[in-house]
Structures are given as structure tokens and as C-alpha cells.
């Protein structure tokens, strides 16, 4: 069941983002209920130095999860590379979730800037997990420059629209050797299960949990959905048929 | 010998001191002279529009305190108390879905809030943008001016016999009402939550062109506009897990863009002030009220986060009760410091 990225294993295939939580207490319950071992945090939204009174980083430390800094809010490769370096120093990890946003309204990635930033960060020794579009060719380019995983969007961040182009997600899975993690767009548990059934190695989500009316309950739902989808993907589903196929066969039935 | 020493001269500390002095206690307030959260606060008394999923117990306290506000304000004189009510306004269909979701939740708690069509909103406030898609009216969500409230509380406290000083001395009971400074004094989880807020002034003398508090969603940006009788409009606020006091261009841009999307006229207003304050936040967004375990004679009244102004009257009443009788009111039970032990 474990997910391996860049040689490191995680017991859970669910990665959680922290944005949108109404309180630290609600977030802590959600992190625990999700079973996640990897949580992504925007460098720009936290301070690495311990703050009096406890904050987000204390919470994550208490939950025993690994921190994945991200470059949310960057619009150019130059800015994203700079933020990634700051994150590596502040959090003492070479892992980075690379986000280079192309547009404020859709928050979709800018593919050209993304590849440039990824190439530079890989050369600098980072373990790069890029948030990308559902374009299979772009995903392959990112893998080719040495990214440790690719993370295609199911739909725009925070939209809750689910996996809007399942075929492309399946193509990406076939196109790259590195782990594929569906990132963004998840609205509810069935979306996460579908992503896993399409062959994804993991799911990254935030809003679907943090802004749910009951975040801990939705986090538990996502935990089960990711597990269910992963199990189903490996269980060899039956083909879809036009007509029924009786589950109890007629052969051998006595003539009465 | 002082009976009660209150550490912190914000609205919470001053109101507690005032109420204790009114009950005949000898009270001293320790003021470090630094501006606290109240200096930045907009002063919305919004138990309804602020009600959020999972925070029902906190909402109950906000509602109870808001009920006490009219009498509390009347005792203090001019604190800018206004009861015109609050309009919730949504710009796009996505914004409206967000506003409707919260309104349905708030209405499910039997709180006074009603959905409004764009024409109904604009009948109440003709200066709202013709582009708005809808919203709601919360008639019981009022406002007060914290920059009038703090001096008024200071005057009332001194008139009731309270001494205000900058040095701590032993006292029978110590009340820690030090906002963000409370963590260092008590070890409780009170952290600074940065908020950037702007103050505008109407270009013409007299009040701004709108009278309701406007809470809005504009292209997924949350913003509020609080009009004061003297012509000021408070526009806020960011919510950031940061300890610095920097005002950023991006925050000003976002706040003004959202505000002008909802009330286009404000582009002509004067930008008089941009500042960053820090709310004393707690893990569950609720205040910490009650005796501090293991520290005899120490009571805390802190961590009011976004709700310090609305919670001032009830905090003062319940903490003065506790200091006088030594027994916490049952209403304090969910807010005990022991929940973070």
C-alpha cells in the first residue's frame, strides 16, 4: 500500500494541504483523521521560526507528519526558484512542491515557466514535485527534466469539480515512470477514488477537506476513498457490458 | 493592597477592571503602552455573519454578548455604536454560492439572517455595484468604533476608582488580559494572527455614502466595509499566520479591489491609513476564560481572536463574577484554560 517518492516511503497515499482551515484545532483533527504522512505548506504563509503560542508548524510536528514546502503564489520561474531556496533553508528539506501559477482567476499552472523552474531546481539538487496541468506531454517533459513525481490538476484549485479529464490523467500515468499524484480539483470522496482507479499513485487535496462543514469527517472519507480506489485499481475490474450477465449461471440447474 | 491586578489595557482588560471596581474592589490595570489588537479592529459586532461550521458554542457566547451591547454602550456614552445592521453581498455566482452556503447554516441555527435579491440589497444601499448577484441581511449585526471604545472604557474605569500604571505589583487576584502577550505570561496557546486593515475617508464632509456594515465576497476575496458617522470607512482584513507588522502592496491591492468591486464609489475616497495588527488567536478560535490551573489567584481572559470587541461586555461581566465569587459561571465552562492542558 505504501507510496514511494524519490526513494522515500509513505504509508498513506493521501497528501494534505493546509489552506482554508477555519482553525488550527479543526486542521489538527483533519490531519489525524486523514492518516496522511505528508502535508504541504506555503512558505509565504508561515514562519519557520517557532512563534510564541504555537502555530501551524507546531501542529504538524505534533501530528508526526513530514512537511512539504510549496511555492504557492509564484507567477514566474525566477520567483518560484527563489522561494524554493528559501524553503530549503527554512525547513531544512530539499523537497518542494513546485507551483508556478499562470493566471489569478483559474490558478492553473504556467507550463513554460514550470519546466524552466523544475529544470533549474533539479540541477540544484532539489526533489521536485511539480503541480502541472492534465497535459500528458507537459507531464512527460517534467519527468524528463528529473522531477521526482508529476502532479496534474484534476480541475482548478478549490473548484471541487473533480477529475474533469480522466482520459488525460490515464494517459499521463502511461507516459511517465515517476509517481503521478492528482493535485487539485477534488470535491468529494468519489473524485479521489476515481483518480486512484485511473492509476494515480496518490492524491493531494486541501479545500475539499479544510472547507467542508465537518473537515475531520471528510478527511476520514478521503482516507478511505484513496485506499478504496487504489485497491480497486489493482483488483482487475470487470468489463462494462451492454446487457445483463446473471451472477448465478443457468448451467447445471435442474429442470423442474 | 490591591484586590485585583489586570494585566492588559485593551478593551477586555479595561472592561474587567471597570466592572470589578463597580463592585467595590480596589483595582489596578497594568498598561505597557503598546497598541493592541483593538487599535486595528473594525469593531463589527457580528455574531450572525461570523457564525461558522463547528463553532456553535462560540457563536452562543457571541450572541449572548451582542445582546448586552446596547446597555453596555449606553453606560459608556459615545462609542460609535450603530444598529443599522449588516449586508452580506456577493459579486459572482461562485461568491453567491459561498454566501448562500453560510447563510443556510446560520439560518439553521435560528440566527436572524435573510436572503436578499440584488434589487433588495440596492434598495437598502444604492451605492452597491449593479453587478452584485445577491446576498443577505443580518439586522442584528451592529458595529462600534474601537478607537472610541478604549478611551471611553479608560475614562469609565478611572472614574470608578481604577488605577492605571505601568508596573506590576502583587495583588489578591491577577487577571491576565494581555492579548497576544498572554502566551509569555501563562504558557497558553495564544498566537498572533496578522490582519492588514485600511482606513478611508469620504471625499465630502459628513458620513460615507452607505450606512450598513457591508461584508462581501468579490471574486473569491473576502472583504468588509464599515462606515462611521464621521466619514471614515474601515476596509479589512487579511488573515495571516505571520508575526511581522508589514503592510504589503498585495494586501492593499486585494482589499481595495474587492471593496471597489462591491462599492465602486470608494475609489474616490482618501486612503488615510494602512496598518497591520495581530489578533490573539487560539487553536479553536474561541477565547480562554477562567482560572489558570496550578496558579492560585490567576485568572485569564484572553485569546479573543476576531471577536474581542463583541465579547467585551460578557467577558467583563463573567470575569468580574468569577473574581468576586471565586466560582466560574457555567457559561465559562467551554472556554476554560484547562481545555489546552
Image (spheres, rainbow, N blue to C red):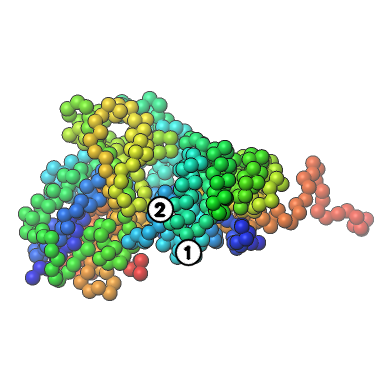
Which secondary structure, mark 1? helix
Q: Nearer the viewer, residue A82 or B330?
A: A82
Q: Residue at x 14, y 66 (%)?
A: B168
State whether residue B70 is above or below residue B131.
below
At which x and y percent is residue A182? 60, 48
Q: Which mark is residue A46?
A: 2
Residue B100 makes an appearance in the image:
no
State whether residue A103 is above or below residue B327.
above
Dot 2, crowdedness within 10 Å: few (<14), some or many (≥20)?
A: some
Q: Nearer the viewer, residue B316 or A180?
A: A180
At which x and y percent is residue A231? 68, 57
Q: Residue at x 23, y 55 (%)?
A: B314
Q: Nearer the viewer, residue B256 or B104?
A: B256
At which x and y percent is residue A184? 55, 45
Q: Which residue is mark 1?
A: A63
Q: What is the chain letter for disc 2?
A: A
Residue A11 makes an appearance in the image:
yes
Q: What is the chain letter for disc 1?
A: A
For the C terminus of chain B, the image quarter is bottom left
- Do circles 1 and 2 both sit on a common chain? yes
- CB within 8 Å, label 1 to label 2: no
Residue that protrudes farthest toward the right in the picture: A255
Query: Marks 1 and 2: which is nearer the front?
Result: 2
Q: Residue at x 78, y 47 (%)?
A: A239
Q: Report, in whole angstroms, how far the alpha carbon at label 1 lies from the one at label 2.
A: 17 Å
The answer to whether B335 appears left or right of B98 in the picture is left
Dot 1, crowdedness within 10 Å: few (<14), some or many (≥20)?
A: some
Q: Which mark is residue A222?
A: none
Amino acid at each position: 500500500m505504501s507510496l514511494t517518492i524519490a526513494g522515500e516511503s509513505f504509508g498513506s497515499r493521501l497528501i494534505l494541504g493546509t489552506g482554508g482551515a477555519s482553525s488550527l484545532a479543526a486542521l489538527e483533527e483533519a490531519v489525524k483523521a486523514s492518516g496522511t504522512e505528508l502535508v504541504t505548506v506555503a512558505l509565504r504563509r508561515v514562519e519557520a521560526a517557532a512563534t510564541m503560542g504555537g502555530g501551524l508548524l507546531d501542529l504538524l510536528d505534533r501530528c508526526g507528519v513530514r512537511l512539504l514546502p510549496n511555492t504557492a503564489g509564484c507567477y514566474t520561474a525566477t520567483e518560484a526558484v527563489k522561494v524554493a531556496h528559501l524553503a530549503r533553508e527554512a525547513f531544512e528539506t530539499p523537497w518542494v512542491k513546485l507551483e508556478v501559477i499562470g493566471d489569478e482567476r483559474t490558478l492553473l499552472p504556467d507550463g513554460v515557466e514550470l519546466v524552466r523552474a523544475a529544470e533549474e531546481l533539479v540541477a540544484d539538487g532539489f526533489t521536485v514535485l511539480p503541480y502541472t496541468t492534465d497535459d500528458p506531454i507537459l507531464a512527460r517533459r517534467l519527468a524528463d527534466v528529473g522531477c521526482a513525481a508529476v502532479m496534474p490538476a484534476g480541475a482548478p484549485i478549490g473548484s471541487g469539480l473533480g477529475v474533469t479529464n480522466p482520459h488525460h490523467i490515464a494517459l499521463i500515468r502511461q507516459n511517465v515512470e515517476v509517481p503521478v499524484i492528482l493535485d487539485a480539483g477534488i470535491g468529494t470522496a468519489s473524485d479521489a477514488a476515481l483518480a486512484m482507479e485511473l492509476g494515480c499513485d496518490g492524491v493531494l487535496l486541501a479545500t475539499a477537506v479544510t472547507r467542508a462543514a465537518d473537515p475531520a469527517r471528510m478527511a476520514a472519507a478521503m482516507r478511505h476513498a484513496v485506499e478504496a480506489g487504489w485497491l480497486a485499481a489493482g483488483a482487475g475490474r470487470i468489463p462494462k457490458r451492454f446487457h445483463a450477465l446473471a451472477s448465478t449461471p443457468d448451467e447445471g440447474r435442474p429442470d423442474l | 493592597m490591591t484586590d485585583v491586578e489586570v494585566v492588559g489595557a485593551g478593551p477586555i482588560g479595561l472592561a474587567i477592571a471597570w466592572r470589578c471596581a463597580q463592585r467595590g474592589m480596589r483595582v489596578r490595570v497594568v498598561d505597557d503602552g503598546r497598541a493592541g489588537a483593538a487599535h486595528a479592529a473594525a469593531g463589527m459586532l457580528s455574531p450572525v455573519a461570523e457564525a461558522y461550521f463547528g463553532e456553535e458554542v462560540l457563536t452562543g457566547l457571541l450572541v449572548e454578548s451582542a445582546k448586552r451591547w446596547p446597555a453596555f454602550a449606553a453606560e459608556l456614552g459615545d462609542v460609535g455604536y450603530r444598529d443599522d445592521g449588516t449586508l452580506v453581498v456577493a459579486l459572482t455566482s461562485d461568491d453567491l454560492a459561498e454566501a448562500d452556503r453560510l447563510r443556510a447554516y446560520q439560518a439553521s441555527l435560528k440566527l436572524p439572517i435573510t436572503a436578499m435579491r440584488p434589487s433588495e440589497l440596492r434598495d437598502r444601499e444604492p451605492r452597491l455595484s449593479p453587478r452584485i448577484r445577491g446576498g443577505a441581511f443580518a439586522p442584528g449585526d451592529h458595529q462600534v468604533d474601537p478607537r472610541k471604545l478604549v478611551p471611553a472604557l479608560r475614562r469609565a474605569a478611572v472614574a470608578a476608582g481604577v488605577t492605571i500604571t505601568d508596573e506590576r505589583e502583587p495583588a489578591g487576584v491577577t487577571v491576565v488580559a494581555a492579548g497576544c502577550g498572554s502566551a509569555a505570561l501563562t504558557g497558553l496557546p495564544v498566537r498572533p494572527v496578522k490582519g492588514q486593515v485600511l482606513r478611508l475617508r469620504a471625499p465630502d464632509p459628513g458620513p460615507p455614502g452607505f450606512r450598513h456594515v457591508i461584508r462581501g465576497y468579490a471574486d473569491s476575496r473576502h472583504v468588509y466595509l464599515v462606515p462611521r458617522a464621521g466619514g471614515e470607512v474601515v476596509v479589512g482584513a487579511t488573515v495571516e499566520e505571520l508575526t511581522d507588522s508589514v503592510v504589503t502592496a498585495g494586501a492593499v491591492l486585494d482589499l481595495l479591489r474587492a471593496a471597489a468591486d462591491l462599492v465602486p464609489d470608494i475609489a474616490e475616497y482618501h486612503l488615510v491609513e494602512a496598518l497591520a495588527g495581530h489578533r490573539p488567536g487560539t487553536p479553536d478560535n474561541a477565547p480562554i476564560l477562567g482560572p489558570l490551573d496550578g496558579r492560585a489567584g490567576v485568572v485569564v481572559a484572553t485569546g479573543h481572536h476576531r471577536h474581542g470587541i463583541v465579547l467585551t461586555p460578557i467577558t467583563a461581566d463573567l470575569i468580574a463574577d468569577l473574581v468576586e465569587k471565586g466560582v466560574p459561571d457555567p457559561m465559562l465552562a467551554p472556554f476554560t484554560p484547562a481545555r489546552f492542558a
